[in-house]
Image: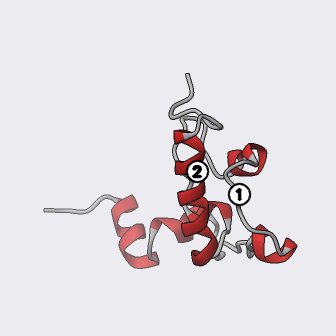
């Protein structure tokens, strides 16, 4: 059982991420909750505001993508569900 040169390099040097980024760590920009910054609350009647938290396929985007805090993420999810029932937002986008 022998290793290729590429397999030896990966096992000695580390993970694939190190090789992809030339050994540099990825730096992410900190995202802030837009509801906390503007001191507003999500509202089911404001469909433009809620559309920013919905994907192209109509799914509710997670907080790690939108940067929304946990408190407002729960509120956004419930307001989106209310807006769907009252026909302010579609259930799915086609």
Mark 1 packing: few (<14 Cα in 10 Å), some, or many (20+)?
A: some
SS under mark 2:
helix
* Residue topped by disc 2: 80
The one nearer the camera, 63 or 35, is: 35
Picture residue at 59% right of the left edge, 77% below the top: 71
The colouring scheme, among rainbow, by chain, secondary structure or one colour, is: secondary structure
Residue lying farthest to the front in this orientation: 86
The one nearer the camera, 55 or 45, is: 45
Picture residue at 60% right of the left edge, 34% below the top: 87
Q: Earlier in the sequence, mark 2 or mark 1?
A: 1
Residue lying farthest to the right in this orientation: 38
Residue lying farthest to the top in this orientation: 94
SS under mark 1:
loop
Picture residue at 83% right of the left edge, 75% below the top: 39
**Could you tell me residue 65's position as x and y percent?**
62, 60
Picture residue at 55% right of the left edge, 21% below the top: 94
**Could you tell me residue 27's position as x and y percent?**
71, 74
Label 2 and label 1: CA atoms lie apart by 9 Å
**Could you tell me residue 51's position as x and y percent?**
69, 45
Q: In which quarter of the image is the N terminus?
A: bottom left
In the picture shown, does residue 18 fall above or below 90? below
Which quadrant would residue 6 be assigned to in this image?
Answer: bottom left
* Residue topped by disc 1: 43
60 left or right of 66 in image: left
Which quadrant would residue 10 be assigned to in this image?
Answer: bottom left
**Could you tell me residue 70's position as x and y percent?**
57, 76
47 left or right of 79 in image: right
8 left or right of 57 in image: left
Mark 2 packing: few (<14 Cα in 10 Å), some, or many (20+)?
A: many
Mark number, residue 29:
none
In the picture shown, does residue 20 fall above or below 84? below
């Amino acid at each position: 059982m022998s290793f290729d040169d590429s397999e030896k390099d990966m096992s000695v040097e580390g993970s694939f991420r190190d090789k992809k980024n030339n050994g540099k760590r990825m730096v992410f920009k900190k995202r802030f909750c837009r509801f906390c910054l503007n001191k507003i609350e999500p509202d089911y009647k404001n469909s433009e505001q809620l559309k920013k938290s919905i994907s192209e396929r109509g799914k509710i985007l997670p907080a790690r993508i939108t940067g929304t805090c946990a408190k407002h993420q729960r509120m956004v999810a419930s307001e989106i569900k209310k807006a769907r029932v009252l026909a302010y937002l579609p259930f799915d986008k086609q």
